[in-house]
Amino acid sequence: MYTQPVTESPLIPTTVPPTITPVTPTPTNITIIPSDLTKDPHSTKAINVTNGLCYKYKGSQFIIQGLTHLSSIEIGDNCFFSVRWFELNELKELEALSIGKDSFNMAKSERSDGSFQISNCPNLTTIVLSDYSFYDYHIFELTNLTSLQSIIVSMRCFVYTPSFSLTSNTIVRLLFTDLPQLQSVRIGFGAFWLSH
């Protein structure tokens, strides 16, 4: 009797499932100018600059972007005279901004530069700009500040901003958009003085 030899079945290769690496969202770029405003941008909750501390700073930009825990910015009097570009962007936890007197002010005369921009700060509720700060700036822009409730622009701020309007959809230099919680705007004597 003939019996066929038993052969083992060939091994079926086992496929190892690919390793799945979780995809983490790309973090917002962190930008801090001047860079010495904070030592640890990933955990900073407050930026406080005391009166006159940065009067020697010669840079032309003040930019804070992407700090995930920052809840307040307070700049004292007589700071950042040479800055011509002020920008706050993508600060998800920022609740309050306060600028002291005579800061971000290069000259008490008209200039064609100077940009103040705050955007994409969903928890920002209060902006306070004290007397003579941003005196010679040309642009004032607030965008996508969905929790903003109060803006105080004190005496002689943005004197040379060429256009000022709270109702027009065709604002040239002063822009308020996406501010659904805004309850109060207080503008001091001489602020936006030469606007039309």
Image: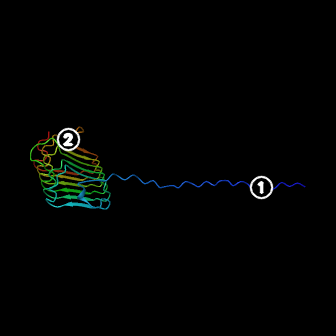
Percent of width and height locating residue 10: 71, 54
Mark 1: secondary structure: loop
User: Pointer 2: what residue?
Assistant: 173
- Tag nearer the camera, 1 or 2: 1
Task: Identify the residue at horizontal 65%, vertical 53% (top origin).
Answer: 13
Between residues 35 and 191, which one lies in front from this camera angle?
Answer: 35
Q: Residue 170: which quarter of the image? A: top left
Count neighbours of disc 1 (C-alpha within 10 A) and say few if under 14, some if 14 to 19, many if 20 or more. Answer: few
* Residue 136, placed above or below residue 32: above
Between residues 161 and 87, which one lies in front from this camera angle?
Answer: 87
Q: Residue 99: which quarter of the image? A: bottom left
In the figure, is residue 75 to the left or right of 145? left
The kind of residue tagged 1 is: Thr
In the figure, is residue 159 to the left or right of 168? left
Between residues 64 and 2, which one lies in front from this camera angle?
Answer: 2
* Residue 113, placed above or below residue 1: above
Task: Identify the residue at horizontal 26%, vertical 57% (top origin).
Answer: 95
Query: Which numbered disc flags the more N-terminal residue, 1 or 2?
Result: 1
Percent of width and height locating residue 164: 17, 42
Q: For the N terminus, give its image quadrant.
A: bottom right
Count neighbours of disc 2 (C-alpha within 10 A) and say few if under 14, some if 14 to 19, many if 20 or more. Answer: some
Percent of width and height locating residue 79: 15, 55
Q: Residue 126: which quarter of the image? A: bottom left
User: Pointer 1: what residue?
Assistant: 7
In the figure, is residue 170 to the left or right of 27? left
Tag count in the figure? 2
Q: For the C terminus, give its image quadrant.
A: top left
Percent of width and height locating residue 190: 10, 47
The kind of residue tagged 2 is: Arg
Give the CA separation, mark 1 to mark 2.
Answer: 86 Å
- Which label was assigned to residue 79? none
